[in-house]
Image: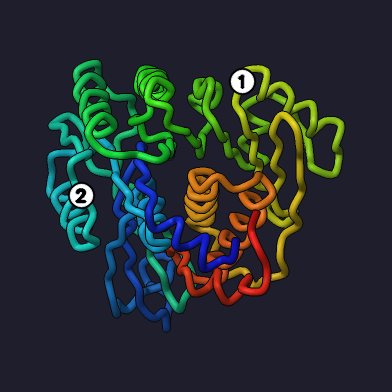
């Protein structure tokens, strides 16, 4: 299958994204002097931006690749929550899966950038788990979408902000299994081993080490392989996909495994690369591609977004330019 055929296949997919959403805000300006009040730079404001972040950036990556993304999360019933829904609407994204709570605030991460250098980040957020009432409402909302929409895969995008509680995870995996929908996970440490029975599990190396309690490097393959074995014994997942930063990616299923080295790139910003990787991996999975294609195309896409500053999504023309001369099985 050519990259053009694969992208055409992606365009028919409808992917449900469940997890923590946020606004990525940027305050940008020039720095010419240091404050006389404290040894800190003075940023002369030039521009302010607001972008969809967290699980919403995963949805943006899916959309950029032609797929339909249905985003499901719990946000605050506040001005930032209103703004997040406006940003979704501007991106022609449905807000049917968004639940508003009076007991939470909408997560906003504000980055202060001076002379193209990241100087400071200010987080406004709640990180406690959903209340029982919020869980019940949210699970019902997601199940309704799963039963009424034609969903090709579900992505669990965990940023440790409280939306993906054990009950939410277990209930939605059970529902996905009942409906025959594949599931993929971009995990965090808190509920790392809760995602039992998922199709594809994608930790980075740090998350793998912390999640299974083994200090390992990819260079020490026996210890790395032992960590993967423990993970798979706990989760009983079909595919393990580990991102290894400068060492590329590693993927494994019951019959095969593959290591794909990283491409040489000028790295500008790694923010959001994991969002791109899980998006491309999920679309490849939904398109019935091999684990080799999942690993190679996801690795390529993740590297491309690292060349851009800030949290950005992959663009299909970038993939076409990079790999128009090969086929994807």
Residue under label 1: 236
Residue 221, image x, y percentages: 85, 37
Q: Nearer the viewer, residue 72 or 271?
A: 72
Residue 35, image x, y percentages: 38, 72
| Category of crowding for the residue at label 2, using alpha-carbon neighbours closer than 10 angstroms: few (below 14), some (14–19), many (at least 20) | some
Q: CA distance from mark 1 to mark 2?
A: 33 Å
Total count of labels: 2
Q: Secondary structure at mark 2?
A: loop
Q: In this rendering, is residue 166 above or below 26?
A: above
Residue 164, image x, y percentages: 38, 29
Q: In this rendering, is residue 15 above or below 52?
A: above
Label drawn at residue 94? 2
Image quadrant in which you'd find residue 15: top left
Left-right relation of 134 to 58: left
Label drawn at residue 66? none
| Residue furthest bottom as drawn | 32
Q: Secondary structure at mark 1?
A: loop
Residue at image point 39% right, 20% down: 178
Residue at image point 53% right, 73% down: 318
Q: Is disc 1 in contact with disc 2, using a CB cutoff of under 8 Å?
A: no
Residue 104, image x, y percentages: 21, 33
- Quadrant the C terminus occupies: bottom right
């Amino acid at each position: 299958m050519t990259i053009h055929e694969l992208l055409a296949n992606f365009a028919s997919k409808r992917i449900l994204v469940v997890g923590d959403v946020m606004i990525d805000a940027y305050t940008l300006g020039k720095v010419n002097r240091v404050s006389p009040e404290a040894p800190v730079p003075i940023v002369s404001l030039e521009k302010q931006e607001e972008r969809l972040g967290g699980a919403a950036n995963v949805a943006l990556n899916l959309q950029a690749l032609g797929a339909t993304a249905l985003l499901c999360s719990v946000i605050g019933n506040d001005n930032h929550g209103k703004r997040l829904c406006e940003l979704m609407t501007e991106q022609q994204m449905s807000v049917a899966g968004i639940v508003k709570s009076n007991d939470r605030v909408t997560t906003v991460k504000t980055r202060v950038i001076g002379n193209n250098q990241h100087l400071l980040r200010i987080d406004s957020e709640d990180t406690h788990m959903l209340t029982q009432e919020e869980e019940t409402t949210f699970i019902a909302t997601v199940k309704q979408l799963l039963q009424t929409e034609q969903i090709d895969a579900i992505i669990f995008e965990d940023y440790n902000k409280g939306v993906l509680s054990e009950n939410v995870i277990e209930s939605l995996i059970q529902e996905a299994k009942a409906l025959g929908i594949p599931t993929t996970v971009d995990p965090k440490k808190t509920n790392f081993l809760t995602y039992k029975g998922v199709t594809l599990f994608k930790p980075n190396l740090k998350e793998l080490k912390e999640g299974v309690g083994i200090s390992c490097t990819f260079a020490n393959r026996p210890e790395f392989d032992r960590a993967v074995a423990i993970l798979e014994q706990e989760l009983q997942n079909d595919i393990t996909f580990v991102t290894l930063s400068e060492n590329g990616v590693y993927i494994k299923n019951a019959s095969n495994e593959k290591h794909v080295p990283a491409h040489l790139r000028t790295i500008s910003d790694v923010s959001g690369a994991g969002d791109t990787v899980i998006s491309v991996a999920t679309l490849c999975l939904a398109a019935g591609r091999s684990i080799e294609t999942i690993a190679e195309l996801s690795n390529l896409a993740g590297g491309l977004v690292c060349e851009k500053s800030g949290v950005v999504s992959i663009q299909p023309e970038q993939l076409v330019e990079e790999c128009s001369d090969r086929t994807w099985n």
